[in-house]
Image (tube, rainbow, N blue to C red):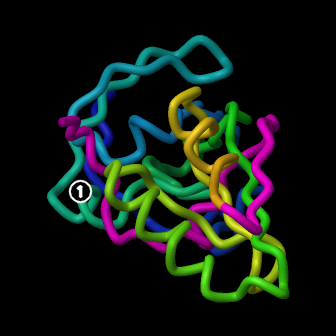
């Protein structure tokens, strides 16, 4: 079975008489056009997505296949992240945090408020963020919410 596009959100589909299978798409694969995956029911699927996935990515709850009997929906598993918090008495550091994360081509997500952010974990990033005055950073495990993504694309570029 080949899936070629995002058809909408699972909340927009009537699934009462259909089997719903989930396919796990890690954050780093969310903008990858061609992939081979396995659903939670053991069904092998191929993804050959159109170019919109390069910019938009695939989000939790996206339907990538639907017929009269089956719906396949994307789920994004929890991953290691860095939760970043800028002290409210250091608001200028928000720009510094965004710049430093963006300079490393890492995706950036809004946190719970104007002073918090989330980015995928790597040790050098955590070390760098911990050194910024007025900023706390901690490793955590959580699902990335692509509806809260700040960066427009997910890059796989390194220096």
Whether residue 136 is situated above or below residue 71 in the rendered picture: below
| Location of residue 25 in the rendering, given as x and y in whole percent from the top left corner | 51, 35
| Location of residue 110 in the rendering, given as x and y in whole percent from the top left corner | 65, 72
Whether residue 32 is situated above or below residue 91 in the rendered picture: above
Residues 60 and 4: in front is 60
Residues 38 and 19: in front is 38
Q: Which residue corresponds to the image point at 84% horizontal and 85% vertical from the top-left? A: 88
- Which residue is label 1 attached to? 54
Q: Which residue corresponds to the image point at 30% horizontal and 56% vertical from the top-left? A: 5
Residues 93 and 41: in front is 93
| Location of residue 42 in the rendering, given as x and y in whole percent from the top left corner | 59, 11
Work out which quarter of the rendered image holds the N terminus and state it: top left
Residues 27 and 155: in front is 155
Q: Is residue 5 left or right of residue 16?
A: left
Work out which quarter of the rendered image holds the C terminus and state it: top left
Please tell me whether residue 151 belongs to the stretch shown in magenta.
yes
Please tell me whether residue 36 belongs to the stretch shown in magenta.
no
Residue 93 appears in which quarter of the rendering?
Answer: bottom right
Is residue 71 visible in the rendered image? The answer is: no
Residue 147 appears in which quarter of the rendering?
Answer: bottom right
Label 1 sits on a secondary structure element that is: helix
Residue 55 appears in which quarter of the rendering?
Answer: bottom left
Whether residue 114 is situated above or below residue 137 in the rendered picture: below
Q: Is residue 14 left or right of residue 57?
A: right
Is residue 135 visible in the rendered image? The answer is: yes
Whether residue 83 is situated above or below residue 149 in the rendered picture: above
Q: Which residue corresponds to the image point at 76% horizontal and 49% vertical from the top-left? A: 137
Segment colored magenta: 133-159
Residue farthest top in this picture? 42
| Location of residue 125 in the rendering, given as x and y in whole percent from the top left corner | 53, 40
Classed neighbour count for the residue bearing mark 1: other residues with Cα under 10 Å, few (<14), some (14–19), many (≥20): some
For the image, the number of numbered tags is 1
């Amino acid at each position: 079975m080949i899936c070629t596009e995002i058809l909408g959100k699972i909340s927009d589909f009537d699934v009462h008489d259909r089997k719903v299978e989930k396919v796990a798409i890690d954050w780093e694969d969310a903008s990858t056009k061609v992939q081979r995956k396995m659903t939670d029911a053991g069904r092998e699927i191929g993804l050959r997505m159109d170019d919109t996935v390069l910019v938009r990515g695939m989000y939790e709850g996206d339907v990538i296949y639907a017929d009269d009997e089956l719906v396949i929906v994307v789920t994004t598993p929890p991953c290691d992240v860095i939760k970043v918090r800028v002290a409210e008495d250091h608001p200028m550091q928000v720009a510094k945090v965004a710049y430093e994360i963006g300079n490393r081509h890492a995706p950036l997500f809004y946190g719970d408020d104007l002073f918090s952010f989330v980015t995928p974990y790597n040790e050098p990033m955590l070390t760098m963020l911990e050194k910024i005055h007025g900023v706390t950073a901690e490793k955590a495990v959580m699902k990335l919410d692509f509806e809260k993504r700040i960066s427009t694309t997910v890059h796989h570029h390194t220096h």
